Image (cartoon, rainbow, N blue to C red):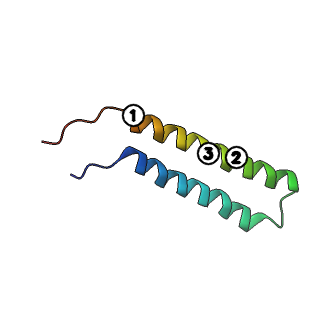
Amino acid sequence: MANFDPALLGYLALFILLAASFAVLAMFAGQMSWTGIAILIVQAIVVLELALFEAKGAAALPRAAAA
């Protein structure tokens, strides 16, 4: 089984969550108020910050030596 870098998986999850947030924005922007759009954008930024924080923490974990 291949060893995956936890930071890379974190960035992949980040990309998927951000893409989903902006897909919702693109689909429903005509029906949303400016407040709803602002909340969605802030939510996407918070997800970005949390994913980067998690990726940095995962990168700092000790790794098992490959056999």
The image position of residue 64, as x and y in percent, is 23, 35
Amino acid under label 2? Gln
Where is mark 3, residue-wise?
47
Nearer-N-terminus badge (2/1): 2
Q: Residues within 10 Å of mark 2 (few under 14, many from 20)?
A: some
Residue behind mark 1: 60
- Going by the numbered disc 3, the residue's amino acid type is Val
Q: Amino acid at mark 1?
A: Ala
Q: Is residue 54 left or right of residue 58?
A: right
Q: Looking at the picture, how far across and down is residue 13, in whole percent?
A: 49, 52
Give the alpha-carbon distance from disc 3 to disc 1, as whole Å: 20 Å
Label 2: which residue? 43
> Which quarter of the rendered picture does the C terminus lie within?
top left
Which one is in front, 36 or 62?
A: 62
Q: Is residue 12 above or below residue 23?
A: above
Q: CA distance from mark 3 to mark 2?
A: 6 Å
Question: Circle 3 sits in a helix, a strand or a loop, which is it?
Answer: helix
Q: Residue at x 47, y 41 (%)?
A: 55
Circles 3 and 2 in contact, beta carbons < 8 Å: yes
As displayed, is residue 30 above or below residue 3?
below
Q: Nearer the viewer, mark 2 or mark 1?
A: 1
Badge 3: residue crowd in 10 Å (few <14, some 14–19, many ≥20) = some
Residue at 61%, 45% in the rendered image: 47
Left or right relative to 65: residue 59: right
